[in-house]
Amino acid sequence: MALVLVDKVHKTYALGDLEVHALQGVSFSIEEGEFVSIMGASGSGKSTLMNILGCLDIPSRGEYTLEGQDVSRLKPEELADIRRDTIGFVFQGFNLIPKMTALENVELPMLYKGIKSRERMERALKALEAVELGDRGEHQPHQLSGGQQQRVAIARALANDAPLILADEPTGNLDSHTSEEVMRLFVRLNEETGKTVIQVTHEFDMARFGKRILTFKDGKMIRDEEVASS
Amino acid sequence: MMSLGETAKISFRALRANKTRSALTMLGIVIGVTAVIVMFAVGNGANRQISQQFASLGTNILMVRPGTDRGPGGGARSEVNTLVVEDAYALAEHCSAVAYAAPVYGGGAQIIYGNANYPARITGTTQDYFAVQDWELAAGRTFTDQDVRSATKVCVIGQTIAEELFGWEDPLGKVIRVKKVPMMVVGILEELGDSPRGDDQDAVVLVPVTTALRRMFSPPKPNSVSMISVKAVDQDRLELAQRQIEELLAIRHKIRPGQQNDFVVHNLTQFIESAKSATAVMTLLLTAVAGVSLLVGGIGIMNIMLVSVTERTREIGIRMAIGAKSGDIRLQFLVEALTLSLLGGIAGILLGLGGAHLISSVFGWATEVSLLSILLSFGFSGFVGIFFGYYPAYKASLLNPIEALRYE
């Protein structure tokens, strides 16, 4: 069974009097363990798709099935549970909470799951070690480089052991060297721990790290291709 | 869902991150609670002092004053001089419920002994006065009926006079000058303390009423008095005594039925009640003012919480994206507001305790901090936190995570 199943999904926004059709009947499926890159220019609907995949938003029409559960008609509270347990987010701007240490940032998703403080700390440390930042737990975000911050964010995405990692332009704020490091980390997580990774990017160089590229244009998927292994 | 303890920890952290702002926000609550505690303490203290002092005056005392009753607070007209010394004697003799009745006529005067002088209240009265007031002598004797009959130049002085004029010297048998009249000290009162009004009751010189009327003052009539102090046989017969006094004086003053009395009988318990209700009104007013400042403090909290929610929109978005429910967010901000107000409340209570202590030691006012006022103001500051914190918290919980994440 596919981890992600998107079936004829439409998303329409009302922008004043204007109706914006951000997604117009998108369908695809992603199996567990895949590493998929979603490409497209701005306005192609890839951010909207990302919001729906991340359960931050629901489709206007069509169905989105995640881990076999139809999540397209869930209430906000139920979506919050799915975000917490099934999805690990990595954002372009890192989105760590300032004035909290790296460790505390990683602990946060577990906090909302109600995990006891001792176990939380142990698991957060393990997640930080997995991104090779085991020694930076007590640093605050502003004391870390961009690449390190992004790795903390990835550790946070791993905290609740969610099967799906959603990365929205994860290298958008990083230089090319650091970008590659972060991408290799995704590849390693994908290959070694079997995490499903979906990333949105507009850089082909970054998209290439995935095994499959979905290309979007004007709210429609126009290509779905395997990346030739080099 | 996150536990309340974890939520409290997050809130503390957020407040610590903005120390100055948090402290300033709390200030309103701190001032409000301090004011409430201090006001209550002063009010309670005043009340207790009034009760104690009136209790020391005795509860079965009646006061007869000249003039017509003009209702509570109206007082008696001073130009009326209808009471006479003989009225007091008649009351003691003919009213069965009256144990003692003492006429009083006096005024203020400078007391002179040698080079020393001191202002005192001169009270011309009879022996009965000591019994009415339950005053004991520390030394010497009171003046006798014989002294009153023949207007002898003897006096009984209060502790303050004894100390101020004589120091270590023994006043008994010494002669002081009161309104140019040489008076021999025959007795010294025991210490009385301050009156309910705050006057020094020990700055007194008691003289035979006749001596006061004939030798010291110039009364409108040679035998008129400004008051008759009456002690009822016991408290149960206080009202009976009041009725008997009114009947007897009406006859003696030839008041026709339907005509208004030319004297008023005051009951001391009425004084206690009116004094207490006066302090109660004052306390209520001041507490209301303090309450308003609590309210203003609450609005301050709401204001800052709204700013904080806006500032932390992105943080709220992040928290929501990684699994916080809107309930978690609402709770977080509510607990933050509550923490602010309760910390403010605690600081206010401590300051209030200190303030009450300071007031009693600097101004010498009796203060009494009640547990009720502490619980009340703590509870109220908690209520203020929840009430004014709810709207910002609710607003935060309504944020759309997508828009919140995009917020710069």
Image (cartoon, coloured by chain):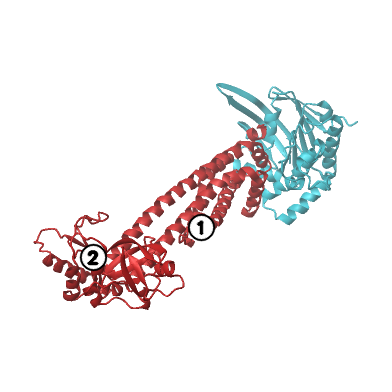
Q: Identify which residue is drawn at 51% across, 45% down.
A: B298
SS for callout 2: helix
Foreground pick, B97 / B174? B174
Q: Identify which residue is drawn at 61% across, 45% down.
A: B22
Classify B373 as above or below A16: below
Foreground pick, A194 / B123? B123
Position of the C terminus of chain B by quadrant: top right
Q: Label 1 lies in what chain?
A: B
Image mark count: 2
Q: Amino acid at mark 2?
A: Leu
Image position of A226 (left or right of B222):
right
Percent of width and height locating residue B53: 37, 66
Residue that sits furthest to the right in the current view = A230
Query: For residue B259, what is the image quadrant?
Result: bottom left
Residue density around tag 2, few if under 14, some if 14–19, many if 20 or more, within 10 Å: many
Q: Colour of chain B?
A: red
Classify B134 as above or below B63: below
Q: Badges 1 and 2: C-beta atoms under 8 Å apart?
A: no
Lower sequence index among marks 1 and 2: 2
The residue that label 2 is drawn on is B213
Image position of A35 (left or right of A23):
right
Q: Nearer the viewer, mark 1 or mark 2?
A: 2
Q: Label 2 lies in what chain?
A: B
Classify B97 as above or below B47: below
Residue density around tag 1, few if under 14, some if 14–19, many if 20 or more, within 10 Å: few
The residue that label 1 is drawn on is B362
Percent of width and height locating residue B83: 18, 64
Q: Identify which residue is drawn at 89% across, 32% down.
A: A229
